[in-house]
Amino acid sequence: MNIQTQSLSAIKSFQEYKLKEQLVYLKENSPYYKKLFAKHEIEIETINSLENLVQIPTTTKEDFSNYNFDFLCVPKNRIIDYSTTSGTSGSPVTIALTENDLQRLAYNEEQSFICANGKSTDVYQLMLTLDRQFMAGMAYYLGIRKLGAAAVRVGPISPQMQWENIHRFKPNAIVAVPSFILKLIDYAEANNIDVNKLGIERAICIGEPVRNADLSPNTMAKRIQEKWSLKLFSTYASTEMQTAFTECEQGKGGHHNPELLIVEILDDEGKQLQAGEFGEVTITSLSIEGMPMLRYRTGDICCYYDEPCACGRNTIRLSPVVGRKNQMIKYKGTTIFPPSIYDALSAVAEVKDYMVEITKNDLGTDEIQIHIALAGSLDTAEQKIKTSLQSKLRVTPALNFVSGQHLQSMRPADARKPAMIIFR
C-alpha cells in the first residue's frame, strides 16, 4: 500500500523506524556524523521519535561545503554517479550516488510524475540539461523510464528546435523552467504556431515557482495560461536532498514522500514551526547510501500545510519557496526576497529578460540594480516596470536597460541555468 495514503500515525511510525535505521548507518559509516555524535555526546539509541531529533545539531550548507567528502558513507568504488549542486547560493559541492541511490532517485521521480497525473502512455519533452553533473535532468529521465513513459531528451535548446521536436514527436507533457515556457509562447506567436492545437496538456515546472505564498497562481503562471491552456504542476527539490516535492492536480502545495525524507520547518533558533508558519526547510534523508543528510538546513524558506488533500494523500505539503535564507535583501528598510522581484518583472510583457544585481553601499546596506532587456519600447515599458515593482515590493530599485546580448555577457558563461540574481 502507498505510504502516502496511510494514516498520519502509520506514516509517523514508519518514519521513526526508518530514522533509527539511518542513525545506525550514519554512526557506522559517516566520518562527519561520527564526529558530530561524539562531540555532542549523542546516544542515538535515545532518539526514538521524530520529536527527539531536536537533540541533534543541524547541519548547514557551510558544513557540507567545508567537509564535503566527510559525508561519504561508502568506498569510492561503489560510487556510480557524481552530481554537483548548481552553486546558485554558494560554491558547488559534490553529491556521490550509489546504484541504490540512483534507483531511489528514479522511484522518487516516478512518484512525482504519478502525483502530477503521469501515466505510462505519456510522452515527455525534457527541456533541461542532462549533462554538467546536473542531478535534476538525470532524475527526471530516470523517473520517466521507471514510469514506463517516453522521454524526448532535447535539453535547453532554442525555442525553434523545441517546436520542431514537438511537431515531430508529439509529446503530451513537457518538463521546463516556467520562464522558458514564456519564450516558447513568444516564438509560437511570432511564427503562427497555435500552442493549443498540438496536444500538450501538462507542464512539470522546475526551478521557478508558479504559485504565490497563498498558493494562488503567480504572475508567470497567469501569463502562461492566458495564452496556453496547460495544466501547470509546481515542483521543489534540491540536489542535497535527492528528493522532490510535487503538486497533485489540486495545486495545494508539493506533496511529501515520507518514505524518502523527514521534513522540519525551523525558525532561526531551531524551533519547529507549526503549519502555515514560514521557516527554513530542514531535511533528514532516508534510505540514501552515498551521502545521507541529517537535519540539513537547505536555506529555503517555506511553510507546510497539513490539512487533508482531496487527492487522497495524507502527507504534508510544502508551499512555494518564498526566498532563500542567504538571499534576504534589506532595501530602504524593506525586507525583500528575490522571487518577489521576479514576480513583479514577469507581470510586464515587455520584459524579455533580466538579471538582479545586489551590492553593498558604503554604509553596508543593500543596493539593488535590475538589468533589463526589453522586447518593446522603453517609453511604454519603463513606467509599467516601476509601477509593478512599487506595487509588489513597495520600493522601486534602480533600473538599467541593456540589450539581450549584453545581458547574456554579464552572466557566468559556465552556469547550468541562467543567473537571475548576482550578489557582488
Image (cartoon, rainbow, N blue to C red):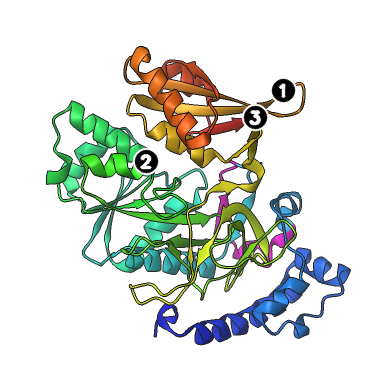
339 in relation to 22, above or below: above
Instruction: Evaluate if marks 1 and 3 touch, with contact meaning CB atoms under 8 Å apart.
Output: no
N-term-proximal mark, 1 vs 2: 2
Q: Which mark is residue 37?
A: none
Residue at left 50%, top 39%? 340
Q: Residue 69: which quarter of the image? A: bottom right
Classify residue 286 by image quadrant.
bottom right
10 Å crowding of disc 1: few (<14), some (14-19), many (20+): few
Q: Position of residue 352 (x, y in %)?
A: 37, 26
Between 203 and 72, the one lying in front of the other is 203
Above or below for 241 versus 382 = below
Calculate the distance from the C-alpha at mark 2 to the C-alpha at mark 3: 25 Å
User: Where does label 3 land, which residue?
Assistant: 332
Quarter of the image with the C terminus in it: top right
Mark 2: secondary structure: helix
Q: Residue at x 58, y 57 (%)?
A: 278
Residue 322 image point, x, y percent = 53, 49
Q: Which residue, given by chain and number where applicable, does mark 2 sit on?
A: 219
Label 1 sits on what residue type? Answer: Asn
Instruction: Give the residue type at disc 3.
Output: Lys
Residue 46 makes an appearance in the image: yes
What residue is drawn where x is 42% and y is 18%?
Answer: 405
